[in-house]
Image (spheres, helix red, strand yellow):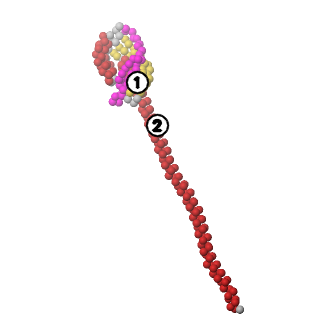
């Protein structure tokens, strides 16, 4: 009876051993599957982060291009504003010089002709200066013979065109004239178009027309 009992219990021991052997293996397989699933999840998360990271350099490059373009636009606008300001300043300086020259040109006194002519030549340049210098001797004699005097006044003036070194100035000038033939003063009104050029930092009359 004892032997029969032992034989009956042996299969149970074998089954327990089998369960002990297969149990951990199945658990390892399950753990592997779970690890694989976890790896898949982690991989997907990394992929999402990688996509976001790729956008960073692209965005930085786009911003850099936009900033560079903005800087270029601001630089161009700044240069244009400065150039416009420089031209306006040049026009004002040329206009002031033209007004002073118009007074010098129309104000004469037969008793001080040398000084008057020197002032006219000093404020002129180019062909106009040459022409005036060549005719000055004859003009002086004519003024002396007629005991002529003149006093000029600029009534109004305007800038017709201007650049940094050249300008056209329109002037309205009244000249009060006396001479031996007409001792009573009379007023001659003239419209003068004067071309001014900047020479060695000075605005000089390069051409004087009576349009």
Q: Quadrant of the C terminus?
A: top left
Q: Which residues are magenta?
A: 182-211
Instruction: Looking at this view, name the residue that lies furthest to the top.
Output: 181
Q: Is residue 107 above or below residue 72?
A: above
Q: Nearer the viewer, residue 206 or 18?
A: 18
The residue carrying pointer 1 sits among few (fewer than 14), some (14 to 19) or many (20 or more) residues within 10 Å by Cα, namely: many
Q: Is residue 84 left or right of residue 1?
A: left
Question: Quadrant location of residue 202?
Answer: top left
Residue 78 percent coordinates (x, y): 45, 37
Q: Is residue 111 left or right of residue 43?
A: left
Q: Which residue is mark 2?
A: 77
Q: Is residue 125 above or below residue 185?
A: below
Residue at the (56%, 61%) spot, across then down: 43
Residue 1 percent coordinates (x, y): 71, 92
Question: Quadrant location of residue 139?
Answer: top left
Q: Is residue 119 visible?
A: no
Q: Nearer the viewer, residue 138 or 130?
A: 130
Does the magenta segment cover residue 43? no
Q: Main secondary structure of the magenta part?
A: strand
Q: Of label 2 and label 1, which has the lower sequence position?
A: 2
Q: Which residue is mark 1?
A: 168
Residue at the (49%, 44%) spot, across then down: 66
Circle number at residue 54: none
Question: Quadrant location of residue 181?
Answer: top left
Does the magenta segment cover residue 205? yes
């Amino acid at each position: 009876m004892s032997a029969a009992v032992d034989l009956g219990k042996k299969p149970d021991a074998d089954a327990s051993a089998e369960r002990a052997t297969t149990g951990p293996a199945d658990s390892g397989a399950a753990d592997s599957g779970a690890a694989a699933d976890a790896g898949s999840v982690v991989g997907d998360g990394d992929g999402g982060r990688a996509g976001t990271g790729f956008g960073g350099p692209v965005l930085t490059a786009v911003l850099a291009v936009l900033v560079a373009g903005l800087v270029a636009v601001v630089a161009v606008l700044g240069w244009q504003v400065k150039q416009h300001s420089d031209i306006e300043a040049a026009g004002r300086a040329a206009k002031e010089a033209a007004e002073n020259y118009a007074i010098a040109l129309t104000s004469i006194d037969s008793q001080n002709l040398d000084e008057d002519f020197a002032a006219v030549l000093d404020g002129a340049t180019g062909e106009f200066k040459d022409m005036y210098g060549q005719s000055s001797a004859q003009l002086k004699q004519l003024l002396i013979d007629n005991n002529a005097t003149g006093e000029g006044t600029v009534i109004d003036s305007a800038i017709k065109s201007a650049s940094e070194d050249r300008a056209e100035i329109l002037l309205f000038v009244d000249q009060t004239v006396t001479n031996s033939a007409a001792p009573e003063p009379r007023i001659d009104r003239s419209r003068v178009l004067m071309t001014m050029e900047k020479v060695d930092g000075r605005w000089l009359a390069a051409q004087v027309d009576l349009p």
